[in-house]
Image (spheres, rainbow, N blue to C red):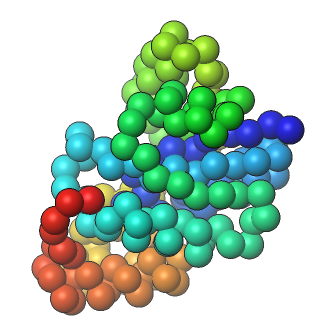
Amino acid sequence: MTTVLYPGSFDPIHNGHIEIIEVASRLFDDVVVAAVRNPQKGEPLFTLEERKGLIADATSHLGNVRVTTFSSLVVDLAREVGADFIVKGLRVVSDFESELMMAQMNKRVSGVDTLFIPSGSSHSYLASKLIREIARYGGDISSMVPPAVAKLLVEKYRNGGDGGGGQR
């Protein structure tokens, strides 16, 4: 049985992420999707628990996907879940530069290899940051995210400007 770990901020999860998860679920026996609190990306809109719930909802049609959260090194989580590989999605060439460096560091630190899955051109422009910005100003993001995400984005911005605050 092959287990892969797909880590990311997923703030929020969008259709590009789901595409990568669906491809991974066809290729591997067990896919662990892990939402991380990434301090380098600033204050998140959704809490880790909200993101975990949104990911679980968006991937409920996939029987071999499980969802978790973490706030440690990706390689530590990979060991914890028994991952044979780390999976990362690539949208554009510039993604490859930063992801390759992380993959090489993860390999050096833990021995775990990273596999890259390219997104389809229909999703290559999607980025959580851009989706949040469109939603903040009332734009239509319904074709970019699962329905539950679209609904919660509207609620977050209607009820709190930037969607909340507090520890994520």
**Position of residue 30 measured from the top left corner of the image (x, y, whole percent):** 76, 48
Question: In the image as oriented, which residue stretches furthest toward the right?
Answer: 1
**Position of residue 146 measured from the top left corner of the image (x, y, whole percent):** 53, 76
Quadrant for the C terminus, please: bottom left
**Position of residue 17 measured from the top left corner of the image (x, y, whole percent):** 55, 56
Decide which of 99, 40 is in the foreground and name it: 40
Quarter residue 62 falls in:
bottom right
Q: Is residue 98 visible?
A: yes
Residue at 41% over, 66% down? 49
Q: Is residue 164 left or right of residue 140?
A: left
Decide which of 68, 51 is in the foreground and name it: 68
Quadrant for the N terminus, please: top right
Residue at 74% over, 72% down? 61
Residue at 30% over, 88% down? 155
Quarter residue 48 falls in:
bottom left
Residue at 47% over, 33% down? 74
